[in-house]
Image (cartoon, rainbow, N blue to C red):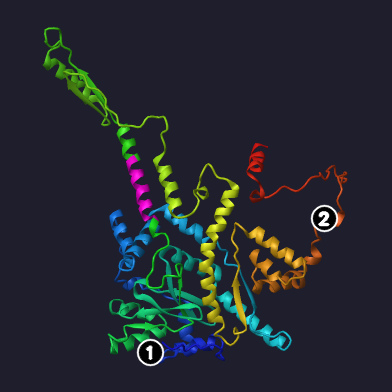
Amino acid sequence: MGNRNSRGANADIPRRSVSKLTGDSVGMIGISHRFAVLNKLITRDLNNNTSTPTFTLYSKDNITEYLKNPYTYQQQLRNAVTYIYGASPHFRRLIQYFTGLSDLAYVVSPYKIDPKTVNPKSISRNYRKTLNALSSMNVRTQFPKILTVCLREDTFYGTMWVTNDSITIQQLPPDYCGISTIEGNVLNVTFDFSYFDGHSQYLEYYPSEFQTKYSAYQSDRRGMRWQELDCPTSFAIKCNDDILDYSLPPFAGILREVYDLEDYKQLKLTKTTLENYAMLVMTIGMNEDGEWQIDLDKAKEFWRNLDSVLPEEIGSVLTPMPINKISFEKSNTGDTDTIAEAERNLFSAAGVSSLLFNNDKASANALVLSIKADQAMTFGIVKSIEDAVNRFLQAQSYGKNFKVTFLDCSPFNRKELAESYLKACQYGIPMISYYAATQGLNQSELDCMSFLENDVLGLNEMFKPLQSSSTIGTSSSDNGDGATDEGGAPPKDTDELSESGEQNREDA
């Protein structure tokens, strides 16, 4: 459908929100009241909740069948991974591990401007508006949810509620969404408005665009069932962006390994339970003539007396013949823990190193390299989010000359990335904002914190820099307080050590 929020529109966020929220369906609602409603986004009314989620535990054979035709069974695969995400701590931890491979640190930079001719005051004013818009998005709280959905289900479908104070992203029901077009390198959402035939109570909890288009669908249920939502406020983020016809959960292939792990746990539980049971055997002896050595009735009386005092876990039997134990247990030689092996197979099937998850043979170098390879997968999704954010910002009058760049930064490479940016700054390259972003300080906070600490609080005058080799020089002599500077190179980081170096450090 047409894009009402065209690029370069001369309006700020509040005006654009007003224009979208004053359609025929909401014309009777005051603008201030509408903003108040949007600032508190309602997702459902618990007092009038007529539907509850249902869950199905699919069998391993079901999963195998679904993977044979993922286009037909994409809904079942999505339901299966959603259920396993809640039921399996291993699967959940795997998804959260990939989600945590990005800090979502970002930098806003000029876009398509000529520094020689541009008006600095205008750039400064629009730059601040762009930073405020990104702050209102709550990037570090909203976007990890998008990452989680993409890594779990493959595709996130969302629409934005835009107000003067916040930009809230609302997730759309994936079973009623599809992808038909790409605009500005961002996937557009096509929505099945028959969803509201069975969920009419939720219509008021969606932007006014849905109410308008649902009315069009009611006029032409066949021709207007699928309608493309307005961009740039609606978008889709896909993990497997090379497959647009259907959603294929990235880790659907390891569902069978998850089931295997549960099967092994159940087998071990059964084995352990059986090993807790015992049986006492009373054998009636016979003489050479084949006669009982004790009267049968008296033997039964002794057996009943014994059986009456035994706990439930111990059984008893009276027999005239010997009973031998037949065991199917493995020998202790070369025995392996099948559960631990199943866990390793699970993570290997997911394409990640089991060293990340409580492995006793962890190698620091192998671990670092494995994390870097995994980070590429998460960062690919982050770049798609970056495209969606830039499409929205550059559609605003204040943001057409700015772009946001998400850094390939995570808790695992923050130190390495920060050192490279700091070194670039030392050589005069303008990357102070990049360095601050790796330390968790956004550009909207950078100058404000500097103003607060220096001009308001005067912390720069209150605290003196700590003494270091750069201020007092290097010396191995006594410092006056009994301490001495020892020579030698500073210790290396773990990821810089060789295998022999790791062993030497552990032995020290």
Q: Main secondary structure of the magenta part?
A: helix
Of residue 316 and residue 420, the one placed in the foreground of this image is 420
Tell me if mark 2 has few (under 14), some (14-19) or many (20+) residues whose alpha carbon lies within 10 angstroms of its own: few
* Image point (56%, 87%), residue name: 12
- Choose top left, top right, bottom left or bottom right for residue 406: bottom right
Dot 2 or dot 1, earlier in sequence: 1
In this view, 148 is above or below 23: above
Tell me the tag on residue 56: none
Left-right relation of 501 to 211: right
* Image point (79%, 62%), residue name: 463
Question: Disc 2, disc 1: CB below 8 Å?
Answer: no
Tell me the tag on residue 467: 2
Find the magenta span and give its range: 254-267
Name the element at disc 1. Answer: helix
Of residue 147 and residue 33, the one placed in the foreground of this image is 147
Of residue 347 and residue 457, the one placed in the foreground of this image is 347
444 in magenta? no
Name the element at disc 2. Answer: loop
Q: How many marks?
A: 2
Please name which of the two marks, 2 or 1, marks the residue nearer to the observer. 2
Which corner quadrant holds the C terminus? top right
Q: Position of residue 229 (x, y in %)?
A: 41, 82
In this view, 312 is above or below 378: above
In this view, 31 is above or below 439: below
263 in magenta? yes
- Choose top left, top right, bottom left or bottom right for residue 84: bottom left
Question: Which amino acid, mark 1?
Answer: Ser
- Per the image, the residue denoted by label 1 is 25
Q: Position of residue 285 (x, y in %)?
A: 18, 13
Q: Position of residue 487 (x, y in %)?
A: 81, 44
Q: Position of residue 61 (x, y in %)?
A: 28, 55
Question: Which amino acid, mark 2?
Answer: Gln
